Each structure stands twice: as structure tokens, then as C-alpha cells.
Amino acid sequence: MSRVLYDHEFFCAFPYSGITRYFTEIIRRIARDPDFDVSVFMGFHLNEYGLEKDRASFESFFGMRRPRIRRTGRLFNAANAALFPWFARRSRADLLHQTYYSDIHPGFKGKRVVNVYDMTYEIFPEMFPPGFKEITDKRKTLERADGIISISESTRRDLISRWDIPAEKIKTIYLGNSLTLDPGPSPLRPEPYLLYVGQRIAHKNFGTLLKAFGRSPRIHREFRLVCFGGTPFTPAELEEARLLGVADRIDQLTGPDSLLANLYGHAAVLAYPSLYEGFGLPLVEAMGYGCPVVASRTSSLPEVAGEAAVFFDPKDPGELAAQLEAVLFDAAAARALSEAGRKRSTRFTWDACAAETMGYYRELLGA
């Protein structure tokens, strides 16, 4: 029997996030395996995924959702930092799987595992303030880790080439897909639409999609552009849309998973123009709903979507517009992508992710 410990760091940072979704999904599955005793310290946290409901399956657990009162974050963080080493000693863990990059419990004597989700900070340093602390913490954590989990081969290659991390220290384990809700009837007006999912920060490259949409009268006459997630459109985005003549053809929505599932289920295509992704989970989600995918020919995206997408140069709005037209106005091509996407999406499950993670734990522990 191997004892595995998970810390609080990212559970305390956000109510919802891709990272805490990942840990929630694998922890629940690993705790059900008879080879592992699982201890979870969520601390005084903000997370809303409900992992505490599984506490009966854990060897030990501490977690309490803290009140969201302004200027109390440092107080709760200090309490967590004081309590975690005590909890870790009581767990007698053989392996600590860190949820992020701080120097959690420097006195821990067992094996350490940490994930790398992407190398965005390192590839796009101009997006972050000079001396951005997270890069320093990340590198130090990776250097002292016994094992590193990368969520794509693309990210694994970036780690090796940029930081000279030994290849044998890194294991690629793909993410799963949590979005399996029935899409239901469309909540939008009866008009077809392209879908964009995610924040619209610089490396997500939304501006290229907006230009492609605006420069193709054939597309924006017959389709709207719906953006899910992130903040409302900025004044600069609205001005760009006005100059392109499409300000009345774009929408921004946010909401629960049920709305996102609905949007995937009824979209004509998912357009994903990102300059860089460590994995690109929206591609897997869209493929699972049979939504055709048009994605950037960069980083991990061809690795994840494979033959189930068409690709374009993310710096070329003209090529993006052409690829969108090739899918939107060719029913046979769209149908072929939809069928290929549904098939490919079955490769990415949390059961497989958890099983491979447990295999990696066993390897590191010499079990």
C-alpha cells in the first residue's frame, strides 16, 4: 500500500479552474484504488468542485471552504502554511503530488511529483512583468521534483529544449474531458454561429479570428461569432469589430458547464486561433460533441486533434478565413470532421489519466 498526499495550494486560489478540475478528477479515482491510501489537505479553500464530499474514501482529509471576505486571503494562506506540514507528517505519505509551484513543506522526505501544463510564461515573457516570480518558483520546483507530469508531448519537448530537464524525468499523461452533459436545445436565436472558447488574452490570439470573421462577408452574413468565457468585450475589441463591420454580429457569454455544453452541441464550428497551448482542452470538449474544429497549426494542438481538425497559420487571418469557409460551406467536410472528432475524443478520459498517473507513482516508488 502506497500513501499519496495532495496539498492545498491551487484549491485555495480559485473557485473554478482547469488545474483544480484535474486534481479533483484524478484524486477521486486514485482514492478508489486499493493500492493507494490518499490524504488530501485542501486547507481553508475557495474551490467549488466538491472534493470534500469524497472525504470518506480518503485516509485523511482537512478542508473548509473559507468565507470570501476582502483582505483575509493572507490570513488564511498563513494558516494553511502552518497547518500543512503537521498534516503531512500525520499522513506518513510516500509521495507528495503538488498542486502548484510553491516550496510546499521543504522538510518532506518522500518522492515529489509536479505537473507542467504549458510554458506560456517562458515563451511569451513580454506578457508578464520582469522577474515574474512564478517562473522562478516553477523552475526550482521542477529541479527538486522526482517526477514531472507533462500534459502533452509538445510541452514535454519545450521543457527539455528550454530548461534542459532530463527527458527521463518527464512523463506525458493526457488530460480527460469532464464535459459530458446533454447539450439540450439551443438557447440562442435560430441563427448559426461560430464558437470561440476561453479568455481573450494576448497569446490566445482572438484578434486574428475577429479579423478573419470580419474579412469574409460570406461568413459574417450567414453566421454569428459567439465567444464563451472571459470578460466582456473590451473597447478596443468593439472598435475593431465596428471597423470590420461586424459589431452587431458578435456575442460574449459566460455561464455554467450546461451552457458551454449547449454551445458546443449547436455550434457550426469551434475556431481556436491560439498561438500556444499546453494541451487545448476545448478541442477535446468540442470533438466530444461532434463540433467541427478549426485550430492553429502550433504547439500541442495538432497532437491533440490529429486528423479530426483542419489547421491554419495563427498569424494569417486569410488562411483562417479560408479554412473556416471550407468547413462551414461544405456539409460533407463538416460531417467528416464531426465523426472523426467524436471518435478521437474517446482517447481523452479521466479514467485513463488516473490509471497512467497511478502507474507513474508506482514507477517512482519502485512498486
Image (tube, helix red, strand yellow):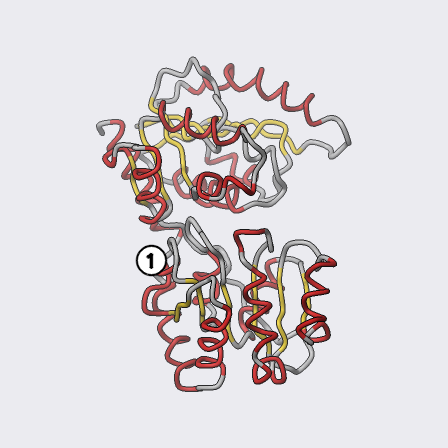
**Image quadrant for the C terminus?**
top left
Taking depth in this image into account, of 183 and 336 the one nearest to the observer is 336
Taking the image as shown, residue 246 lies to the left or right of residue 323, namely right
* Residue 290 seen in the figure: no
- In the displayed structure, 36 sits above or below 150; it is above
- In the displayed structure, 120 sits above or below 279; it is above
Label 1 Cα neighbours within 10 Å, binned few <14 / some 14-19 / many ≥20: some
Query: Which amino acid lies under the numbered mark 1 shown in the image of this protein?
Result: Glu
Q: What's the residue at 24%, 33% (across, down)?
A: 363
Q: What's the residue at 45%, 42% (across, down)?
A: 28
Taking the image as shown, residue 310 lies to the left or right of residue 191, namely left
Q: Quadrant of residue 29?
A: top left
User: In the rendered image, which residue does mark 1 sit on?
Assistant: 303
Q: Position of residue 172 (x, y in %)?
A: 31, 44
Q: Position of residue 110 (x, y in %)?
A: 34, 20
Q: Position of residue 253 (x, y in %)?
A: 68, 63
Q: Position of residue 276 (x, y in %)?
A: 45, 52
* Residue 30 seen in the figure: yes
**Image quadrant for the N terminus?**
top left
Q: Quadrant of residue 196?
A: bottom right
Q: What's the residue at 61%, 74% (across, down)?
A: 214
Q: Quadrant of residue 47?
A: top right
Taking the image as shown, residue 347 lies to the left or right of residue 66, namely left
Q: How many marks?
A: 1
Q: What's the residue at 66%, 34% (across, down)?
A: 65
Q: Provide the secondary structure element on which disc 1 rests.
A: helix
